[in-house]
Structure formats: structure tokens, C-alpha cells
Image (spheres, rainbow, N blue to C red):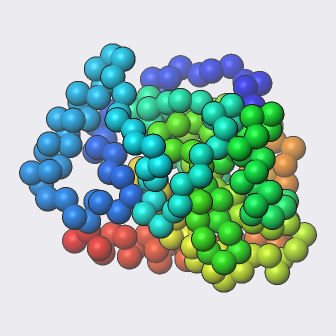
Amino acid sequence: MGARRAKDKDADRRIGRRALLIGGTAAAVGSAVLARDELARLWYRAPGVRKPRKEGEVDYAGARWVAASDANWRLADRPDDYGIDMVIIHVTQGSFDSAVKVFQDPGHGAAAHYIVRKDGHVTQMIRELDVAYHAGNRDYNERSVGIEHEGFVDRPEDFTDEMYEASARLTARVCARYDIPVDREHILGHVEVPGTDHTDPGEHWDWDRYMKLVTQARTAVAASRT
Ligand SMILES: [Zn+2]
């Protein structure tokens, strides 16, 4: 990561977007609250003012928080400083525990926002506000949320039903939060990131199945807001 020159920040900036709503609260808010959030969002745009953060807070209601080493990501204020328009799918090439451990290791130099375990458990290690070093491409890191999946690319049995379903629900929520289209241009594998030498999630990752599940979950999120 960091091999590429930073592009103009404003090119990615999304103007006039709704306030960032943290994990699952969107369904509960009324228009008065939205108006207040709109004001709050503008206030946060003032120079030097960042959104408030609470230790242990997650962006996805179903996730458990375990902090990654701050050497493996950088502080940002997304989606205000960088627009988010991609979800990048990874496979850990190891166990869930080993992935958590390396993301906590400041010497590793990389980490993703989320890890999905084979049993469907989701751990968040980096806030979506921040830029995680997971794609090996600075521009893609700045624009994306990275999701790791426990297992090995050459072991299709690692990709369990529970994992596909939990990951699809998570991706659907991310897509809903940032208005990301549910298609393969915006939900991509690490292997598809320009300049990468990584092959994950590999040929056994069932994209047709996954995209169907994300589409279903995205529809369910939309329905829950009406
Ligand atoms: Zn990867």
C-alpha cells in the first residue's frame, strides 16, 4: 500500500449526502432526527472538527469490536473526506484467530475493517470512518470497506452457509449506508484490485450465490426502513 500517489481528495468527495447513521439506527429515526443529523453533519464539516468516536463502538450492529493496531490503518473522516463506493472481499489464508492476531500486530502493515468467521460471527477491527490498509492500492483503500473471510482460497469447504449469509448481511448494510450499488463493479474481490498480486477470494468463492444473498439482504434493509 501507499505505492500510488494520492489523488485529489475532492474528486472522491460526495457532496450533499445524508448523515452517517451508525449500525442499524436508520430504521428508528424520524424526520426531525434526520434534520438534526443534517445540521450535525454540516457542523462536523467545519475545519478540524471530526465526528465523535466512542471506544468500542461498531458500525455494524451484529459485530463485536476488537481494535486493530493503529499502524495498520489511518485516521480519516469518511464518507466526508473520502466517499465510500466499494466493498472488497478477502479470504484470510488462515484461521480467524490468526487473522485477528496479525491485524493487532503493528508490524503486519495491513488489516481489514471486518473479519467474518466460519460460524457467521463478525468482528470489526477498524471503523468505517477510517482507511484500512487491505487492498494494496491507496485509492481503493480510501474508497472501500474491506471484509475478510476465515479460510483458504483452495478449500471451498471453508466458505460455509453461515459465512456467506453473515457476510451478505454485512455487505448489504454497508451498501445501504453509503448508497453503494449492489453489483460486481462495486462489490469486488481483492484479486480485482488494480496492481494487486493477491488472488483472494479465489475461484471457489461463489459470487453468484453471494450477490444473490447481498441483493436479498439489501432489499430487506430497504423494507425495514419504510
Ligand atoms: Zn485480500
Does residue 182 show up?
no
Quadrant occupied by the N terminus: top right
Foreground of the two, 43 or 177: 43
Left or right side of 38 for 85 = right
Figure check: 209 above or below 78? below
Name which quarter of the figure residue 210 lies in. bottom right
Foreground of the two, 143 or 151: 151
Residue at 58%, 36% in the rendered image: 131
Q: Farthest residue toward the left?
A: 32
Residue 115 image point, x, y percent: 65, 59
Foreground of the two, 8 or 79: 79
Residue at 64%, 43% in the rendered image: 68
Residue at 17%, 35% in the rendered image: 39
Name which quarter of the figure residue 23 lies in. bottom left
Q: Farthest residue toward the front?
A: 55
Residue 65 image point, x, y percent: 54, 54
Q: Farthest residue toward the right?
A: 154
Figure check: 146 above or below 222? above
